[in-house]
Image (cartoon, rainbow, N blue to C red):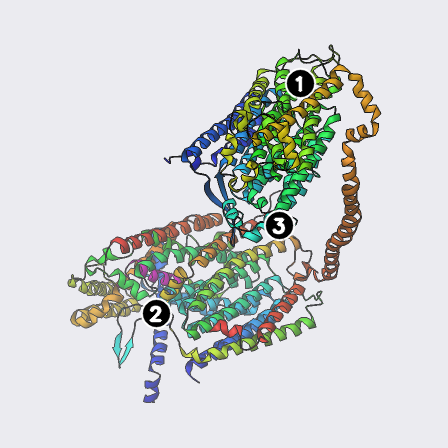
Amino acid sequence: MTASLVVFFVLAALAVIGAVSLILQKHPIHSALSLIVVMVALAGLYLLMGAEFVAAVQIIVYGGAIMVLFVFVIMLLNAGVEEHTSISKMAGAPGLLLVVALAGFVAATIARSAESVQTASQSGVMSSTKDISNMIFKDFVYPFELTSFLILVAILGATVLAQREKN
Amino acid sequence: MNSFLAANAELLITIVKIALLLFVVLTVNAYLTWFERKVVAHMQSRWGPHRVGPHGLLQPLADGVKFLFKEDPTPAGVDKFVYFLAPLLALALALTSIALIPFGPDPIRFFGHDIYLGIAPPDVNIGILALFAVTALGVYGVALAGWSSNSKYPLLGGLRSSAQMISYELALTMSVVGVLLMAGSFNLKKIIEAQAHHPEWGILGWNVWPQILGFFCFFVAAIAETNRVPFDLPEAESELVAGFHTEYASFKFAMFFIAEYTSMITVSCLCSIMFFGGWLSPFPASWTFTHYLPSAILIPFGLWVIWDGIRYETIFGRIILPGVGTVIAALGAVFVVLPGVNEFIQGPFWLVSKILVFLFVYVWMRGTLPRFRYDQLMSFGWKLLLPVSIVNVILTSFVILARMQWGGK
Amino acid sequence: MVPTNYYVILSAILFGLGVFAFIFKRNIITIFMSIELMLNAVNLAFVAFSQALGKLDGQVFVLFVIVVAAAEAAVGLGIIILIARNRQTLNVERVDLLKL
Amino acid sequence: MPTHPILEYLWIIPLLPLLGSATNGFFGAKWPNKYVNIVAIGSTGLSFLLALEAVREFFDSGQVLLRREFFTWIAAGNFRAGFDLQMDQLTVVMVLVVTGVGWLIHIYATGYMAHESGYYRFFSYLNLFMFFMLILVLAANYVLLFVGWEGVGLSSYLLIGFYFLKKSASDAGKKAFIVNRIGDFGFMLGMFLLFRTFHTLDFTALFEKAGPWPPEAMGQLGTFTIACLLLFMGACGKSAQLPLYVWLPDAMEGPTPVSALIHAATMVTAGVYVVARSHILFMHAPTAMLVVAIVGCATAFFAATIGLVQTDIKRVLAYSTVSQLGYMFLACGVGAFSAGIFHLMTHAFFKALLFLAAGSVIHAMGGEQDMNRMGGLSKKIRWTYITMLMATLAIAGAPGFSGFFSKDAILLAASGNYLLYGFGLLTALLTSFYMFRLIFLTFHGKQRFDEHKIHVHESPRSMLAPLVILAVLSVVGGWMAAPEFWGGENHFEKFLEPAFANASEHVTQIPVDPSTRTGKFLIAFGEGMGSALLKILWTYAAIAIGVALVGFLVAYWLYLRRPEKADGLAKSMALAYRTLLNKYYVDELYGAVVVRPLVWISTNVLWKVVDVAGIDATVNGIAGGTTAVGDGVRHTQSGNTRSYAVWVVVGALVILAVIFFWPSQMKPVVGMVR
């Protein structure tokens, strides 16, 4: 039970609790807050794994931008407590069943696949930002450029959606 | 007992540091308000606070007391949890961000422990990123406060602040990239050392000169991030009563207050570290005599304080001020006599003085500039600040590339 | 060190919770958040594996995922605002005309 | 600069007409006729000059066969079909005939078509034809030759149907195309067989391989025989031999220059050319040779008989063309390839001339084609008359004229077989008869048309000039192959010697053995002249001349002296007359035997069963099935996002299940991780 394990369990618990509360909360803002908790916890986990840069980006982009956007929208639309309809039949008992099955499968599959790397798990490389940037701008330069294009498109799309059609 | 000490020395030291920092920051905050009011007052040719204590020096204390003892009503229909969470969040994040700032290059040896000035060790790999991460979260305090208090003005204030912060965060981050490129690291210490690359250049080696554009963008964006004039729309008195903290009273309000001033300090620190060489002296390294500058400033100042104090007939004036004066003067004297201490004090001295300058600029701007209109704010952020900072990044990278190509070595 | 398994199982749990939320929440915004949650879970797995294998690809992927998530959030929230404007509701079950 | 520029760039000769065709086709519509003329005549004329230059260089180079590979067109496995052109004596003849006559006819056409709409279209087609024809004759392998072959078929179709608004014209075009398809089918089969046997379709390589093989025995159906018969089938289609001749008479629906160029001078002789080109193969297949000879002879006679009674001036010429082609095949069939080619050339001259003259007549008569409404034109259109008379004498085989020599050579070659020889003579008689009948009906006797309605006028120079040139050619053209005993010597044959290296002995051999009775008789007949051979030759010539004379006299007697007798004759032999008039009812026969069954099958089997019940049913069935499935699945599209979400989960579940239960030795997931 090393210190890192303790930290891990604390953070993991935080994340899971956050996720659960995301589901249980009735008001979107609370859900958003719990999601933020999850993200911060994940960032902590990344730090624990030595992925500093990813951790920082996780908080800056997810916590600092995306979730702010969510909160902003919620405030803008003044979203109230979510109403509890159940029109869809699929999303009832069968949905629940399926979800459980899916979670089981995911867990099983990933676990099985993880067995193979468990041994390698000790190679804790402190990933320097330099290496990551090297990768992005050398090996992954074309995907990177593509993402830039994607973002441009997203901006345009958002703009088009946002502006009210003039009549 | 001793063994316990030995075992958790690091922990203890950290805790002590935190307490110390907390105290310092809070005091500084308190006196920052005094400073602000004074300066603005003089700019508007008023006296400012001068009733409580000499030069109104006890005003902050009074305010603090007032904050603590005021009634704290919770409006009806607020979202309790968030309502309480928001100020805490704001304060906590502000303090965290300042905790990440190194105040001096080299540690104090203390019972075999290296104790750095500042809570985090100065060379965190992703120092600046971590700072940004924390400041990025800062927006929640305001936004949530605005939303949770379940009332029009705060909601508007919250909306504004969140929008404003998202918009200006981009510019903020982009404007720093230039500096990062030049330093080749996120590490604050490295960034500062990069500015001391030519020890003889002194002030000319700082980042402001090559990164003047970046500095401009950064400073403006930073002011916006801290919701200060001329970007204080979230709390625009004339439109939104008091913006996001309209519904807050007494100590919760104080938290917001402190948070704001703390982040001001943080920003000043960042400015001086990023662009003004942090703890570097503006003079060439060879001018060793400049190392006596601190004492040269402190001793006269202390003497002046003594002299100023004894003119008063109040107890405070008679006793305390001279006391403080002697302490200050003594400090100056100590530096002179103990060169080791003197050397050690150089960094913090310069850093603090730079910070003070920036704080003054803050106040100065508040005294002079009118508030932006909301659309102006947005278009300024998106159409001027962001492009300029991006251009800055591009230019910088080109220059660096050119140096790599033809600059040799 | 923490065994990779732990991280991976955690990410699986988070993912499952995300799916659950995705199905059983009615508020569009919340559903959107649950998508983000799933993405995060996947990211966790990525980073875990990359750390386990001592390769950085995983982290790079994570960065890409984050970028994509940002773009997606921008557009998606735009759509949500539009829906809220035209339908005066955020309940997905009330938005089933397959058109704005 | 190569020593033989044109030979190095042989492709330019066919290319020029193609360019002309393209230019006219694309831009001609807007242009005045003048420009179109310049382009069309210019391109063909230029290629004619280039051809001359090429021939000069060819002789200069003194090679027997000259082959140029320009680029590989198809390369599949060991099969190579290149854009290879070759030049040998045979090609020389053909190229000169095609370009020369073609050029003249182009010039003629500028006058003839002057008032037609679609002028540019006509010349575009005509140039296109020139291009393909040149490809055909220059090709150095069967594939490229086949390209030209099909190309001329296409352009012939286009030109026959030039007046496509006239139903008869378009029908004739279709008929020509379809009938040719049948022949081409055989031709392709022949090519395939050849490739299968010799693994190449290049002339040189193929013939080199084929040469050493032993000839097949008479009556043996070996590879050579079958291949040759198949090729000959194609030749039948293209050269209008029995039983595929039916399209040629109808092809007269096209403008007269077309009839002259394509359906008399050049294209229809392509069959003969092919047979001559692959003579080596034919030499190996006596059976095929015999078939060729018989078919040629039969066609010659058959068409001639039909020609006797036709009243449409162009149709008479059409049938005469068929029968003359028959002669050529007869020649090839008996191995006298050079004679066949010789006749091909002379025929190109005088038959083109005849058609052009006929065109001139029609032009003069304002579109009238029925000879019964003509007569007495000789004074009005003197030039046309004279030139046409020359052509008639030539084709009828008047001594000294080109036709005489060529036909004589053929008959001489055929004289080995009494039957062929007899029918050949008979055909010659008929030929001279119907030709003079044509002349008399058209130019002599009293006018059978209304002066005031039809203003008869001589044609413009542009039309007369080619007539004169061709007339000269058809008069003197024969002398280049005048047999020894005519003082001259057979240059032509000598010239073609290398091309028909191993076929020549057939021609030069003594046609009949003096020891036999006929031999004796012949020798007796030709008393008092040189050697036995000469006597015999003389005799044959005399017989030919006599036959031609008889034909002339009969025609004279029937159509000038006692015109009523002709009708009386027709009445007295009504049945025969009607049969001939209706061309032996061949078209009707084909209609009954081939066309009707085909139509029936197409309607009742292919359409009602295969198409409706088979294809349509399948297609509709698929569509219907899709619709049904869609109906079933539609209900999942509730528009409720949460349901969709569940479906997404289902999909994910499936994928995961696949991954999970994957055969463990593969373990895709682990593979991914490692």
Q: Main secondary structure of the magenta part?
A: helix
List x then y, in percent, for residue B62: 40, 66
State which mark lies toward you, 2 or 1: 1
Distance from Cα at disc 3 to Cα at disc 2: 103 Å
Instruction: For the C terminus of chain B, give its image quadrant.
Output: bottom left
Type of amino acid at the residue the image marks with label 3: Ala
List x then y, in percent, for residue B227: 43, 57
Q: Is residue A45 visible?
A: yes
Q: Which mark is residue B124?
A: 2
List x then y, in percent, for residue A64: 47, 62
Looking at the rendered structure, whether the residues under marks 3 and 2 are on a common chain is answered as no
Q: Residues within 10 Å of mark 2 (few under 14, many from 20)?
A: some
Type of amino acid at the residue the image marks with label 1: Val
Asked if D104 appears above or below D287 in the picture, the reply is: above
The residue that disc 1 covers is D361
Do residues under tags 3 and 2 come within 8 Å of each other at their CB atoms? no
The residue that disc 3 covers is D217
Type of amino acid at the residue the image marks with label 2: Val
Distance from Cα at disc 1 to Cα at disc 3: 51 Å
Distance from Cα at disc 2 to Cα at disc 1: 110 Å
Q: Residues within 10 Å of mark 3 (few under 14, many from 20)?
A: few
Looking at the rendered structure, whether the residues under marks 1 and 3 are on a common chain is answered as yes
The residue stretch that appears in magenta: B261-279
Secondary structure state at the residue bearing disc 3: loop
Judge from the rendering whether residue D605 lies leftward or rightward of residue A41; answer left or right. Answer: right
List x then y, in percent, for residue D94: 54, 33
In this view of the protein, which residue sits in the foreground, D213 or A116? D213
